[in-house]
Amino acid sequence: MKETKSIIFVCLGNICRSPIAQGVAQKYIDEKKLDIIVDSAGTGDWHVGEAPCPHSVKVAQMNNVDISNQKARQVTKEDFTKYDLVVALDDSNIANLKKLGATNILKLGTFGYEGTDVPDPYFFDGFEGFDKVFEMIDTCVKNLIDKKLV
Ligand code: 4NP
């Protein structure tokens, strides 16, 4: 594997879950002084250019992770060769990524939550549930980096 490693987290809209994963990973990488590039994207294009959803910004901030400057973008085929690891947040993201031609897709939930989906909080009732989503992502992202990239 090349010297600098890289990882991209992919969900549906790139405004709720994968921005948290990117933020958690970036903070962990910075703290441990690791040589890893991290990014995130969505399979859908509805929110391209938007900042993460306010509940994700809030739960991240409560955990000392700043994701407020991120901007949503749609995943591209180039991402599949550019990044060493393509990590999906749920099974529907994996199916969408396969349709786009991705092959080596990891599922984030296999790194701490027995392979479960990180639930899509977009239609949650308010802030409730975002803390659980953060906890799942936080645990799995750190385990993933330790296991696959260090
Ligand atoms: P995310 O959540 O995939 O975690 O960013 C969603 C955001 C937007 C939509 C769905 C899920 N949407 O349908 O617009």
Image (cartoon, rainbow, N blue to C red):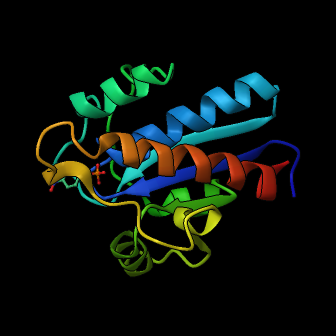
Residue 142 in the image, given as x and y percentages of width and height:
67, 45
Which residue sits at x=61%, y=40%? 38
Please report the residue visible at 48 percent of the width from the left and 44 percent of the height from the top.
135
Q: Along the horizontal axis of the image, is 110 left or right of 126?
A: right
| Residue displayed at 36% across by 39% down | 131
Q: Residue at x 74, y 39 (%)?
A: 36
Residue 50 in sight here: no
| 81 shown above or below 70 | below
> Does residue 104 appear anywhere in the picture?
yes
* Of the pair 79 and 6, the residue shown nearer to us: 6
The vertical placement of 53 against 41, above or below, is above
Q: Percent x, y for residue 13?
A: 26, 51
Residue 98, horizontal then vertical, whole percent: 44, 79
Image position of 78 (left or right of 144): left
* Foreground pick, 106 / 71: 106
> Does residue 6 sit above or below 37 in this rendering?
below
**Quarter of the rendering containing residue 126:** top left
Image coordinates for residue 138, horizontal then vertical, percent = 55, 43
Q: Nearer the viewer, residue 23 or 39?
A: 23
Residue 29 placement, left or right of 118: right
